Amino acid sequence: MTLLILLSNIMALWHPISTHADTITINTDVPVIKFPGISQSDFSDAFNVLNECLVRDEPRHGFSQPFIAPGGHYGGCWWQLDASLSLHGTKWVDQRFSENMLRGFSSVQKDDGRIPLYGIDDVPGYPTGSSLPKLFQAADAVLRQAEDKDLKQSVYLTLKKYMDWWFSDARRDAGTGLITGVFEESFPPVEKELKAVAQVDLNVEIVIGCHVLAELAKELGYTEDHRRYTGYQKELRSAINQYMWDEVTGAYYSYHVKDKKLDSKLICYTFDPFRMQIAPPDRTDRMIAMLTDDKYFNWSKNAVTSAAKTGACYTETRGPYDGAPSWSGSIWTLRNEVIIEGLEDIERYDLSAYLALKTVRLFNDNYTEFVNPTDGSGHGVQRYAWSAAQYIQILVEKIFGLDYDRQTKTIRIRPNLDSSLVGEKISLEGLLLANGSRLNLHIDNRTDSVGIAYSISGDRHDLNIVVGMVAEIGKKVKITVPEGRRIKAKRTRQKQTALYEVANKNHTGEFVFVTQEER
């Protein structure tokens, strides 16, 4: 009943969502893609979804800038989580819009630092709160492509106030040091009592946020803040591993701080501690065994389910969003994207590539709120902004492997291709970079080698291009150019893999990475 009342409140304040071509120029700035199973119209339509969800008649519920609303019956209201996730898509077509949306978050921040769940800021039956704080990662992604130093300073202060609210007595449990959450500060959104439960996804997100803030503080010269957020990160990592791990099942669970016990529900956020290698190596092997066992989370079928199939709460929702049940079995991009990143963090690039491709194909031309794990059908809102944005993010950043840092004037190209793509040629042409240049990228994925060719067009050619690939321990990579000349590469040995990279300041380049067995 509470969720129905919430939706009624939204509908009562509904205004039609409007669009404006000068705000997001997605019709002209969508890159041309060549990828098996994905048509150009499919790819373009993901950007169309973002355009359909654009609200520009600001301010709306205090938000001072145009923003991306969730879509569908959620109306023209801003939501912290939805708008944050959408930035990972909009930054590839309109950097200025994305920067302005960050400014909009500052305009709705409360005096105590809290950024509300959404514009109406009232959920009947639940305490006043925020939502899962994906804003830290989203802001970092946009700021890394930004040139405006004043923007970085102002956004840093917004994020700092927001983080300090999470670490205040209002949310941090004194006994464990964990951060507690209510309602949509975690998913499933079930908790109604303040300072009762510390959820895995919330605490992992705060660890990542502390890392983002520490790095920003270091860059901006705030030495004390850098020390503070580095310390917070260490404390929270330790608390997650001390209180949320169950040795018997080999999984992480939310922790009831009042009752001093683990929650019983096995939710796929159990894998979130892959991120930043929060989970120590002696645990990740057990976690991977669970992740890849179809008994639990659907690994070999239609991407990862939001709850374990073995649990009593497991539900396959069809039709409209139904609150917690829809987060207890259905497949969401929100849940799969964090696992994809986490698998990269622990250097399981093979598993990350597999899940990235599964997720992209499942949501391709199916940008719905959530997907049924049995038949892959889409449910909830049919044109859902964050699903479209994360589809774009996973495809561009996790499969094609693109990363752009305007501060260092560096773009990295490190494809992460699932083994099923061997023999395929894929490409992105005309990808708009924040400095106004455009990138053309062609990848030839052969049996024992990967060919990577790129070119940069536009008036500004101040980029340093770093092209690379990851090899398993026990294998080495030889890099050549088309005429057969071998190129010296930088080899960075990691725990389970080795990263081979070659830097090139030229506006065009073509390299072949040949994988060989080490002698």
Image: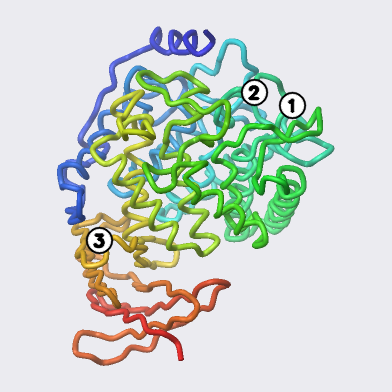
Q: For this view, does 210 lie left or right of residue 59? A: right
Please name the amino acid that badge 2 sits on.
Answer: Glu
Q: Is residue 495 above or below residue 417?
A: below
Instruction: Return the x and y of residue 150 as percentages of the image width and height.
Output: 49, 49
Disc with the residue nearer the chain's start (3 vs 2):
2
Picture residue at 72% right of the left edge, 46% below the top: 248
Picture residue at 48% right of the left edge, 25% below the top: 315
Q: Which residue has dot 3 on it?
A: 437
Q: For this view, does 505 lie left or right of residue 159? A: left
Residue 197 visible (yes or no): yes
Instruction: Return the x and y of residue 495 as percentages of the image width and height.
Output: 58, 72
Residue 4, labelled with which disc? none
Picture residue at 52% right of the left edge, 54% below the top: 342
Alpha-carbon distance for marks 2 and 1?
8 Å
Q: Is residue 468 above or below residue 241?
A: below
Q: Is residue 25 above or below residue 36?
A: above
Q: Which residue has dot 1 on it?
A: 196
Alpha-carbon distance for marks 1 and 3?
50 Å
In-front residue for pair 278/206: 278
Disc with the residue nearer the chain's start (1 vs 3):
1
Disc with the residue nearer the chain's start (2 vs 1):
2
Instruction: Return the x and y of residue 412 as percentages of the image width and height.
Output: 37, 67
Which image quadrant for residue 101?
Answer: top left
Nearer the observer: mark 3 or 2; the answer is 2
Q: Which residue has dot 2 on it?
A: 191
Please name the amino acid that badge 3 sits on.
Answer: Ser
Alpha-carbon distance for marks 3 and 2?
47 Å
